Image: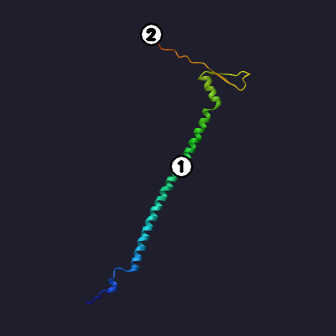
Amino acid sequence: MMMQSLPSSSQLKLFSWPRTIALLLLGFICFLLILIVQVQHQVRHLETHYAKALQKEVDLHQEFGKLTLELHHLTALARVEEIAVTQLRMTIDKTPEHNNIQTIFLNPVVKPSIQSGTLSKGKGDE
């Protein structure tokens, strides 16, 4: 049998500066790699939110355009005048001496009052 030589005192020395610096650099590099992965994940997450926000902005601009168009349609002078004359029974007094002045007369709508004793009976009530 062969005898193995015993380790020398320099080999038993556990602490050495070059080995410690190498381990610290290796740990620091691993820490930086983990940070890089985390930052990349955050960037992807923010890009997704940004794309969704841009799409929502486009949708809101389209809706705003539709609502503006509808507002212009509903507030058009011809439409307002038609509703005033047909539904509200308003009239416009256009006399030559009042060129730039319009007088609007309202015809009140009289609703029949319902009194307890004056209701007429229908055909099926008799």
- The kind of residue tagged 2 is Gly
Q: Residues within 10 Å of mark 2 (few under 14, many from 20)?
A: few
- The kind of residue tagged 1 is Gln
Where residue 1 appears, x then y in whole percent?
25, 90
Look at the picture and state if 112 lies above or below 62.
Answer: above
Residue topped by disc 1: 55
Q: Secondary structure at mark 2?
A: loop
* Marker disc for residue 25: none
Q: Is residue 16 left or right of residue 65?
A: left
Q: Is residue 13 left or right of residue 68?
A: left
Residue at x-position 62% and y-position 23%: 85
Q: Residues within 10 Å of mark 1 (few under 14, many from 20)?
A: few
Where residue 14 appears, x then y in whole percent?
34, 80
Which of the 4 quarters of the picture holds residue 69? top right
Q: Is residue 6 left or right of residue 95?
A: left
Residue at x-position 61% and y-position 23%: 86
Residue at x-position 62% and y-position 35%: 72
Which of the 4 quarters of the picture holds residue 109? top right
Which of the 4 quarters of the picture holds residue 15? bottom left
* Marker disc for residue 117: 2
Cα distance between the residues tagged 2 and 1: 65 Å
Q: Are marks 2 and 1 in contact (CB under 8 Å)?
A: no
Residue in front for this viewpoint, 87 or 16: 16
Where residue 26 appears, x then y in whole percent?
42, 73
Look at the picture and state if 119 lies above or below 38.
Answer: above
